[in-house]
Amino acid sequence: MTRRSPLNLALAVVLACGATTLAQRTPAGGYQDLVALFTDWSAFERPPLLEGAPDYTAATTARRHAALKRYQSRLAVIDPKAWPVEQRVDYELVRAQMNGLDFYIRVLKPWVRDPAYYQSIWTAQSDTPAHEGPTHHAVVELWTYTFPLSPADEARLAGELHSVPPLLRQARRNLTGNARDLWVTGMGTMQKQVEDLQALAVRTTPAGGELKAAIRDASAATASFVSWLESQAASRTGPSGIGKADYTWSLRNVHLVPMSWEEEVVLLKRELARAHASLRLEEQRNRGLPPLSAASSPEEYTQRANAAVTKYMAFLKDNNVLTVEDYLDPALRAHLGSYTPEATRNFFGIASHYEPITLFTHFYHWFDHAWMKAAPHASVIRRNATLYNVWDSRSEGMATAMEELVMHAGYYDDNPRAREIVWIMLAQRCARGLASLYAQANEFDIKQAKAFQVEWTPRGWMRPDLDLLGFEQQLYLRQPGYGTSYVTGKALIDELVKDRAHQLGNSFTLRTFFDELNSAGLIPMSLIRWQLTGIEK
């Protein structure tokens, strides 16, 4: 698969050479002016510093909101109607991200409502293009470091950690919101940061004094912050959802999903029913077969996982499902997980111990990472992850769609019981998505959302005593629309398959479809549909 047409590559070179000059003049309405505006706005989107940490204070945020309107006015001057569709798509991507910042300031206000926004320490890479949910602008990505640290990395890590104490001092002034569930779950997030910093101190025992002091100061500041959150918790009594109207506005104007809160409810109810009904039909079909057996040791799990990836990659290639570059196998094989005792397996661990590929198909995410690195998009507007999780319908939708697509393409024909897991996976995604919709509408609190997700996940695989349940519902409360993006994105992909198959007729193939889709980049599915089919709405 190639991501760069000669035209796009030439255009990218021209834009890169002219960006500095163009950023200094008023937009004249051309595509190059859009790129210049995007470059300007990307720099503006990062807030200024206050005492060495990003400034989210009320006064600065108000000034930035006013400045954002000036960037949006610059965008409005540009008229893309006569441009090629690919360039018009880029225009909409810029608009969506500006809308994202506007939504954060007007409605979501994570720096005011959500203590978890102040989490700085991230120990693992997200499988999605960027972090799931709101994160501040000075996070410390521990997973990017190699231990033991070099002297240069020690200095870099110490410098990053120096922002933690001033950020948490600022947080006490900023966090004036009354969202109880966000507050209480955020306390847990920040307590986890205390533990992560303690583990980092042990891991860096041989380090020099500067890094040790930075870790010590960050740990003390985080522990003190947790105590402050606990002292304030009783006074936080309000709802945490943003309401149906604001949810729909964000869905349509930030994530570019052409649906409303009510329409997502209808879709997820239908998909939940389909998943449960299909599971029962599979069980009827397979009633004479022996049950699946789970991996029972670390060695067996590793053997099964590696064998599954080998079979899966061959299946994709031999059946012409998608173009399989050499780097995709190691990209997937690097994320196989490990054996977990049965008593502590979460939902996804249960699935992967029975049949690894039922989970690994969702790891289309790691293919996306590999493509972004090996074949970056020609458009600078699409080259990196879009802000504000604008990518969620494509990223999570495609990962979810792949689970069922591979099943229908015949992967489990020699293991029919595994088909049951695919329907269980879909049911779980629908249950948690529906729960998140009711939580955003303030019809559920987070306790009720968790209970709903547990009740409608088959076979008791979603247990209330495991951390995954709390993590998922907290994330979906923090990031409206994320909990539904798996199922809604998949529905938009189904629609795109229908449209392209209708347009191409007998020349339609899955491989061509995936090559087109992947070449469009990690952008909302509505924009990919427009680019590939010419259907704007």
Image (spheres, rainbow, N blue to C red):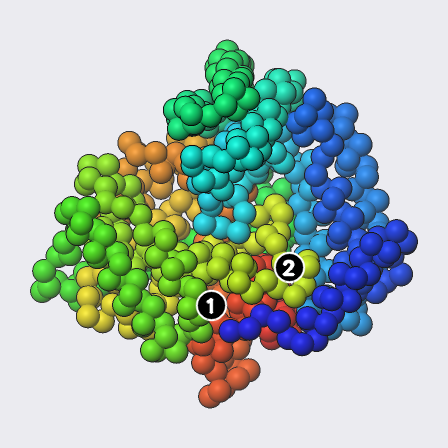
> Where residue 464 sits in the image (x, y, percent)?
30, 34
In the image, taking residue 30 as reference, residue 272 lies left or right, namely: left
Image vertical order of residue 102 relative to residue 162, above or below = below
> Where residue 517 sits in the image (x, y, percent)?
53, 69
Q: Which residue is drawn at the image coordinates 63% and 42% (left, top)?
A: 246
> Where residue 33 sits in the image (x, y, percent)?
82, 59
Image vertical order of residue 87 relative to residue 132, above or below = below
Q: Which residue is drawn at the image coordinates 46% and 88% (left, top)?
A: 506
Image vertical order of residue 396 relative to residue 7, above or below = above
CA gap between label 1 and label 2 equals 23 Å
Q: Which of the 4 quarters of the picture holds residue 52?
A: top right
Q: Which of the 4 quarters of the picture holds residue 148?
A: top left
Tag on residue 382?
A: 2
Q: Give, as a three-letter code, the residue at label 2.
A: Arg
Q: Secondary structure at mark 1?
A: helix
* Sequence order check, earlier mark of 1 and 2: 2
> Where residue 320 sits in the image (x, y, percent)?
39, 78
Tag on residue 494?
A: 1
Image vertical order of residue 257 relative to residue 200, above or below = below
Q: Nearer the viewer, mark 1 or mark 2?
A: 2
